[in-house]
Amino acid sequence: MRVALIHDWLTGMRGGERCLEVFCELFPDADLFTLLHVRGSVSATIENRRITTSFLQRLPGAEARYRALLPLFPWAVERFDLRGYDLVLSSSHCVAKGARVPRGALHVCYCFTPMRYVWDLYDDYFGARAPLAVRLAMPPVAAALRRWDRRTAVRVQHYVAISRFVADRIGRCYGRDAEVIYPPVDCQRFRLSEDAGEFYLVVSALAPYKRVDLAVEAANRLGRRLVVVGSGPEERRLRALAGPTVEFLGWQADAEVAELYARCRALLFPGVEDFGIVPLEAMASGKPVLAFERGGARETVVPLEQGIESPTGLLFAEQTVEALAEAVRRFEANAHRFVPKALRAHAEGFDRPLFKERIAACVARRREEFSRC
């Protein structure tokens, strides 16, 4: 059986690439297709396979400014030659699911989300903070991308969503059902800590929709120490907002992030995520999570409530500084109720070996069904 893996782009080891790494292990002889590859940016498991890139790879400055090429992405992914492959497994948050798959091949898509730039998060990327030229040009471009995204949804036989939240979005955008298999958390990367902790922690890209500003302002208001790990376009604005108790560390390697989880009091998670691996990484370290009550956090955080013996965090109902500050105060009054070993046990329900088993079983089941058609 010839297998093709398709991934939007390879520019760093984020949650999507950790899923792709498992797909590479499951199909060690598979070929990998991607719009653009920054060499050395992903793990050896991914780097060491045969990687085919699109024409975007050859454009000047593409590695640094590839997101500006968004209007070309559909054309690029449709030019991949997938003739001769029996199984196509795409991992898609943008256009990978729209590749042209040959007749007789099975296409399973592990969907992180329908194209977020033109659906739910359009305003975050192209709204009031975008340059005027972008705001003027994007409405017709986004409309065309939405039409393409919806039209090409039929090229996938089976969707697998990363959360129920995303499965609902797939139904709304594509009119398709999706099985849910949660992404992997590599619990072995994190040590269980039973220390009370020294600071609150944010681990996030510094992008507008992540709402790191709420954590910064809540720390300012309460006078609590906050450590922020990550980089992105919001960094300058967030540094300007920060008071003396807030520290920015920029990008950090995996080992340093794991140590920060072990030393923190709790993770602050004020954005809306399609799933959110970071909260589970904190739990694997024995640390609770204070999260906005929307998106994937509702599926991973067991909230502090009367009668729940092993809570893993708190959920706050409004995406405001006041609501997050109140969640911090409530956490501090109930910190004794969070048991590090129970937090770790909860995270292990999402562990990497379980993800690998579930994906393998799903693909095998879909192949058997497809062969009977």
Image: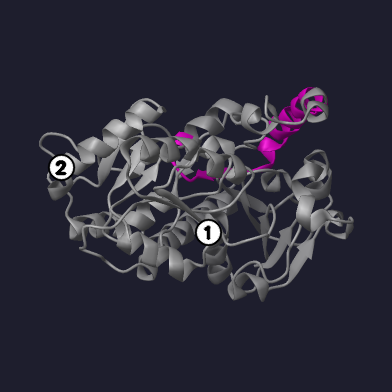
Residue at disc 1, secondary structure: helix
Which image quadrant is residue 352 in?
A: bottom left
Question: Is 244 placed left or right of 92 in the picture?
Answer: left
Labels 1 and 2: the sequence-earlier one: 1
| Badge 2 density bin: few <14, some 14–19, many ≥20, Cα 10 Å | few
Question: Is 83 placed left or right of 90 in the picture?
Answer: right
Residue 334 bears which disc, if any? 2
The residue singled out by tag 1 in the image is 19
Residue at disc 2, secondary structure: loop
Magenta span main SS:
helix
* Three-letter code, disc 2: Asn
Residue 369 horizontal/vertical position (percent): 53, 50
| Up/down of 328 relative to 357, above or below | above
Instruction: Tell me what residue is drawn at x 16 percent, y 40 percent.
Output: 333
Q: Specify start and end residues of the magenta stretch as a single range.
A: 137-165
- Foreground residue, 73 or 355? 73
| Up/down of 322 relative to 295, above or below | above
Residue 309 bears which disc, if any? none
| Up/down of 142 relative to 13, above or below | above
